Image: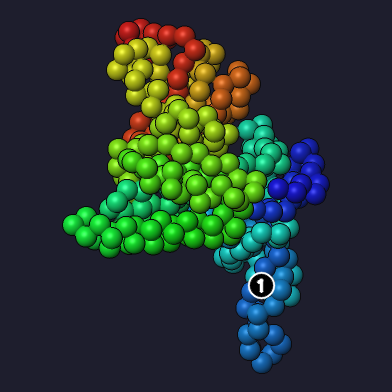
Amino acid sequence: MRILSKNLKKGYIELIPENENDLWVLYNVIEPGDVVVGHTTRDVRIGESGKSKRIPLTLALKVTNLEFQPFTERLRIHGIVVEGPERYGIKGKHHTININLGDKLVIWKDKWYAHQLRKLESTSIPREKVVVVTLDYDEVCIAQISEQGVQVLLEESSRLPGKRDPEKFSITLKKYIEKIVKTLIDIIEKYGIKIVVAASPGGLAREIVSRLKSLKNLTIISDTVSIGGCSGLSEVLRRDSIKEAIRKLSIIRAHEYLELFRRLLVRNPELVAYGLEEVEYAVKSNAVEKLLVSSSYIRTYDDELRRRVNDLIDEAYRRRAEVIVVPENSDVCIEVNGLGGLVAILRFPLYKASGSV
């Protein structure tokens, strides 16, 4: 993210998103009620003829909602036009601004929360792009992992023949491996991948690794899983060796913390909190060490709920908690939503009058 100028007293930041993750950050920072200024096009009537023509405009929208499909390069901002050329009579009309990579925009807020500013600043820190391939003799799955979540790029069966004909099996297996390697190389070059994780029940992962070793500036990790294909993907993400290599990605840490939360909920329930009321109490008590927040909670149309969640995140940061906003398309977010949208791991046990956290 390139920040061109900002004046927090006046309430605006002017910036340019430079990659997909920047768009994901903007999706989580821009809220209903904000005003966004950007370049766009719109059909307007020209002269007395009544004919319409699509022309370029700079408009200011009061945001009503946003659309962002993870792993794409476009953010759609819907809203009501509050500023624009008077001669076209579009003030008060609905409009959508499409924000692509390299587009300049200005965001105006009544209040900038500290965690929103922190999120914008964090985009200057490079994040590794990771691809995971899990395979066995039956199927293969290739997925990209980023701050936006997990995107499956390939899922298909091997179509290997039976082992009764060893020669045919060996030839087909070689083609199967070569096809996977070619697909991986194409993905590495297209997305600028820096880390590849290959995992399989047997030695297939080592075959993949040996064929990728000649590529420069690439970290390759090999591990074992009980099953290949996309069923083995979640197993890979739980492995300590993998987590250590790519734990800079917040989605990996979110998986790790949710797993810890589950264990504590059974063994030491006084060391966890979930749901808005419990987590607010825990944050105010300076007890929260790690906090997972559903991204849908910071974009809710309920103004009061959004304010409470933003205040809670700011307070958690001030009290040195680690906060992760979990992307909606992830398995973690589904579980966090089922627990009230917020999940916290505590530094020390907390008890309410009822005896629970």
Instruction: Kindly identify the amino acid type of the residue bearing the numbered disc 1.
Output: Thr
Coordinates of residue 263 in the picture (x, y in percent): 34, 20
Residue ID at (66%, 72%): 41
Q: How has the structure been colored for display?
A: rainbow
Q: Is residue 78 above or below residue 320?
A: below
Q: Is residue 308 visible?
A: no
Coordinates of residue 133 in the picture (x, y in percent): 43, 48
Q: Is residue 198 above or below residue 155?
A: above
**Quarter holding the C terminus?**
top left
Coordinates of residue 221 in the picture (x, y in percent): 50, 39
- 248 sits to left or right of 329: right
Residue ID at (31%, 53%): 139
Q: Is residue 8 visible?
A: yes
Q: Is residue 232 above or below residue 155?
A: above
Name the residue nearer the viewer: 313 or 266: 266
Element carrying mark 1: strand
Q: Which residue is label 1 attached to?
A: 41
Check the image and name the residue furthest to the bottom: 49
Mark 1 nearby-residue class (10 Å; few <14, some 14–19, many ≥20) = some
Name the residue nearer the viewer: 237 or 195: 195
Residue ID at (67%, 34%): 118
Residue ID at (58%, 59%): 190
Q: Is residue 322 above or below residue 9?
A: above
